[in-house]
Amino acid sequence: MTHEIKAALAALLMIAGAVAWAEPVVIYDSGRSESIEAYVPRPKPQPKAFKPKPDALIASLLDRRFPVHTPELTPGIVAPMASAFSGLTQPVFLVGSDDLSRRWLRQFGGKLRAVGAVGLVIEAQSLAEFQELAALAPALRLVPVSGSDLVRQLAPTLRLEHYPLLISARRIEQ
């Protein structure tokens, strides 16, 4: 670029910058100015859509999942055994709303939290029972779900009959 073009560009940028920051200039004012609001239609207020509180929505959706039953499993003692789930990246535990599961959850909640286990609540009559379990283990993620499909898939290799239990990549234990 030549020196003259550079100077012209610099002058143009300076003028454009000054105009962009300049105050508005009144060209004519008769003293009878009117607001533009009379000529521009106001937007119509939109009715507010019903938005349920997130907690109420979650409770409503959860409530539809109950009762949860897994007739193939009952509360009881589980003998430790080797797991066939070497590819399992996150431990899973099975619990119900029975007294044994509640005691187990209280006793091993810290261990379950430490290993990052996710809980499948496989037996609960109502949302209230599920929420009681969640209150026993507030730092754990619990999901209400029937364990029937899980038991059927494991039946050929393992003989699961009881819960509560923890399933990890290496072991199944209580």
Image: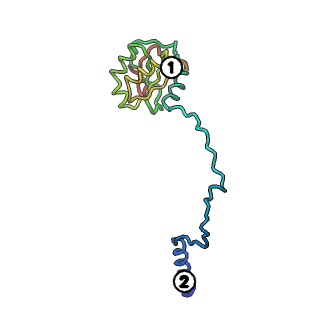
Residue type (three-letter) at the residue carrying disc 1: Thr
The C terminus is located in which quarter?
top left
In the rendered image of this protein, does residue 35 appear above or below residue 114? below
Quadrant of res 26:
bottom right
- Please tell me whether mark 2 sits on a helix, a strand or a loop: helix
Decide: few, some or many residues near mark 2? Use Cα within 10 Å; few <14, some 14-19, many ≥20: few
Q: Nearer the viewer, residue 167 or 109?
A: 109
Dot label at residue 23:
none
Rendered residue at 56%/72% (across/down):
25
Q: Nearer the viewer, residue 93 or 137?
A: 137
* Scheme by which the image is coloured: rainbow
- Please tell me whether mark 1 sits on a helix, a strand or a loop: loop
Closer to the eye: label 2 or 1: 2
Rendered residue at 38%/25% (across/down):
137
The residue singled out by tag 1 in the image is 157
Rendered residue at 38%/13% (across/down):
99
Q: CA separation, marks 2 and 1?
A: 81 Å
The percent position of residue 20, horizontal first and vertical second, equals 54, 71
- Left or right position of 58 against 78: right
Residue type (three-letter) at the residue carrying disc 2: Lys
Q: Earlier in the sequence, mark 2 or mark 1?
A: 2
Rendered residue at 36%/18% (across/down):
104
The percent position of residue 108, horizontal first and vertical second, equals 34, 23
The residue singled out by tag 2 in the image is 6
